[in-house]
Amino acid sequence: MSPNPLMVQMAVAAHTRRIRLGQAANIIVWHHPVRLAEQIALLDVISGGRVECGIGRGYQPRENETLGRPYGSTIQDQERNRKAFEESIAIMKKCWTEPSFSHHGEFFSVPPTYTKWNHKQTIAYFQRDGMGRRLDDVLALGDPDMYSAGNPVQATTTTLKELQVFPQPLQKPHPQLWEPLTSARSLKFAAEHGINGVMIAEPNDRLRRNIDIYYEAAEKAGFPDMLNRGRFKFGWDAEKRRGIMTSRYLHITRPGKEKEALERAARAIELQFDYYGPFGFGAVVARLDEPMFDLTKKVTAQMLRDREIAIHGSKQYVVDTIMKMRNECGYDDFCFLGWFELGGFHAKEIEEQMQIFAEEVMPVLARECGGKVELPARGLDLVV
């Protein structure tokens, strides 16, 4: 758990060379999109181009209104929230891909049309040839303002027309975008805009249907991709790193300690869904042949285990259940996120779970799936 994944990952980037750095996810309507784009670009530069950018819409009041932002997230304001989210994405992409830009939309005006900018350096720079932008692209020159007093920078009618963002990301055109997805509407939007999907709590049959929705929307839109690479494999394409990643709650038991471990894990996962369930997560736990669950209904550990959303058991059971999900969902390649964090477990216990998975489960999965993608070592040597 982290209140600021980007700052944490800046520290991680300085000590690693191979792993990629993703967030699940930055609720982008919390932030001004220009500032968030700068921070993500800086992390990409410092890490040597290892950032995967997670974006979230902030569809719940606890994600938006608690911070006093005007973009809405209540049942009355979902449409306004979506539009603010979509506009933020458009601005972030401009920050990353254009040498200078302007944006004048419903929620943001960047730069504002009234921003005074009578700087001699800017005027001299863009009067030169080969600067990439003409002076009249960047500034609207005007005479001094007869009603103003003070220095020439402020006593002017010259205004700024475009803004430049520094730095731009090392990855071109920009880091891959990821979005947690549940509804058909969000699945289609992500697919149509080249955004990778993250699925969290759906049973296998609902997950398979969601992958179909995503893939069909991507196909209809011509398989949008930030690198224009065309069709990607069904579900996930490891070479292009495009498509859907799915995740499951994991807890691996050891021989002789199964009963205690499963009881503790059951209490922990139920505690988590007592919180998440009423926000809507409980509804998507239902299989396709079941009605959506009443949001007031308690989601039990047994329910999550029966639907193989929580995979709690022996090492072999975990391997078999993950492979069953891959096969039932029809993935060509496979991208899997293991969720190890459980309330009531010490950090050391969670680290042990991750180590068991890395050393004893991942090699089996890699072998069963025909190998794995080797990530090259990338990064910068930092001197403080």
Image: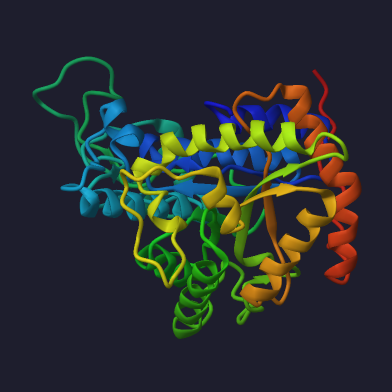
Name the residue located 48 percent from the left edge and 48 percent from the top edge. Answer: 55
Answer above or below: position of 244 versus 340.
Answer: below
Residue 186, position in %: x, y? 39, 62
Residue 143, position in %: x, y? 19, 36
In this view of the protein, which residue sits in the foreground, 99 or 261?
Answer: 261
Residue 293, position in %: x, y? 35, 55
- Left or right of residue 352: residue 154: left
In this view of the protein, which residue sits in the foreground, 318 or 49?
Answer: 318
Residue 299, position in %: x, y? 45, 45
Name the residue located 19 percent from the left edge and 47 percent from the top edge. Answer: 77
Can residue 205 be seen in the rendering of this structure? yes
Furthest residue toward left: 147
Answer above or below: position of 206 versus 136.
Answer: below
Identify the image's colour scheme: rainbow, by chain, secondary structure or one colour.
rainbow
Answer above or below: position of 1 versus 93.
Answer: above
Instruction: Assign the N terminus to one quadrant of the image.
Output: top right
- Left or right of residue 147: residue 87: right
Name the residue located 62 percent from the left edge and 23 percent from the top edge. Answer: 344
Name the residue located 86 percent from the left edge and 41 percent from the top edge. Answer: 356
